Amino acid sequence: MPTDNILSTSLGLELAYFSGRAWMSGRGAGVILRFQRVRPRRPDRFQPLRSSEITPRFLDRMLRALKRWKYDIVDMDEVCRRAVIMASPRRFVGLTFDGAYKDLITSAYPVLSRHRIPFTIYVPTAFPDGVGEAWWLALEQVIARESRVSLVIDRKERHFTTRATAEKYRVYEYIESWIRTLPPPELSAAIKDLCKRYSVDLEKLSREAALDWSDLARLAADPNVTIASATVNYTALSNLKDAAALREVTMGKAVAETAFQRNIRHFAYPFGDPASWRRTHLVMAAEEAGFASAVSTIPGIVEAAGRTNLYALPRISWDGRQRSLRAMRVLLSGVTFAPVQPTRSSQTN
């Protein structure tokens, strides 16, 4: 998100907070919050994935605030239950973590366990197996290190200058958008080619960033932790043919159930892929596979009395560049607002 848009959104949320709407009324039964990484803040100027990170300190502040605001912090089974019954006087928050990153156990779990808070981890099983490819991390590392990047895009050799930080951000956004459109074999070939050109060990990078099975076994032993599925390879299902997409849904569940010897009841579309939950047969596949729910990244609240589809549950994806608890309180309330438009002077600065 461009800086002007971040500032505009932040200002709009702050104004909504001070208007009093954030606690005078709340829509729906509750909300599901989506996080990815939890780790200490880094000084690097180039951090294209910064929006997907929060710090342990922010996590602690947020949990204290949720308790102070009298939200019920619940697991995904309870989210589903409250979505189908009549609205409760108290609204709920469900905490979810995508990607199964290693820092979940090193930085997030000590905070969450201290607060005795339930949360859900969506696991793409190829990563604890050590064969997942975190292409987005490899792309970040290449662009961070290099002043010039070359790769083949649509059968043509392309060259990008990445000296200045602003150039790095533009190039990362462009290449990432292109990579996301590729079917898995082409995506894998593209990122391996890039890593070979610039001496990045994709296998090691991916393995070190992810939870392994022993980490997950430790987490699964905690009754406050719900282990859920995010397919096998964490591939956007909309880039797959129907049969392959269905295999990803069913095999991710089967592998996780074998590993943990328990029923895996909840599912996340990889990257919240909007095109996936719009494909009716994939939503039906999640239900037919035996999942009780499937979460997306549709922004919004969970309605009560069955008004929200349990297989396209909305989540609020928290932007880690935003550290205001006032802003979070507004988002949790379900209040909508029009972002404040930058003034002419701010646009030219």
Image: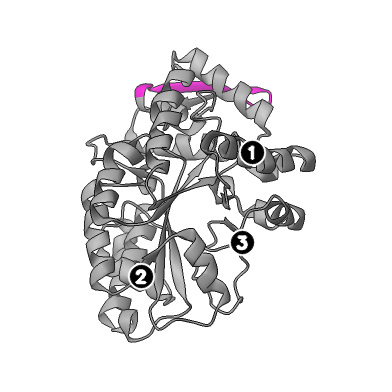
- Disc 2 and disc 3: Cα gap in Å? 22 Å
Is the Cβ of the residue at disc 2 closer than 8 Å to that at disc 3?
A: no
Q: Amino acid at mark 2?
A: Asp
Q: Amino acid at mark 3?
A: Ala
The residue where tag 3 is placed is 312
Q: Choose mark 1 or mark 3, whichever is in front.
A: 1
Q: Amino acid at mark 1?
A: Ala
Number of residues whose C-alpha sits closer than 10 Å to that of mark 3, classed few (under 14), some (14–19) or many (20 or more)? many
Mark closest to the chain's N terminus, 1 or 3: 1
Instruction: Tell me where residue 146 appears, x and y as whole percent.
Output: 38, 21
Identify the disc placed on residue 344. none
Q: Residue at x 30, y 57 (%)?
A: 322
Is 48 inside the magenta-drawn segment?
Answer: no
Task: Please tell me whether the stretch drawn in magenta is mainly helix, strand or loop.
Answer: strand
Instruction: Tell me where residue 287 appears, x and y as whole percent.
Output: 69, 56
Residue lying furthest bottom: 24
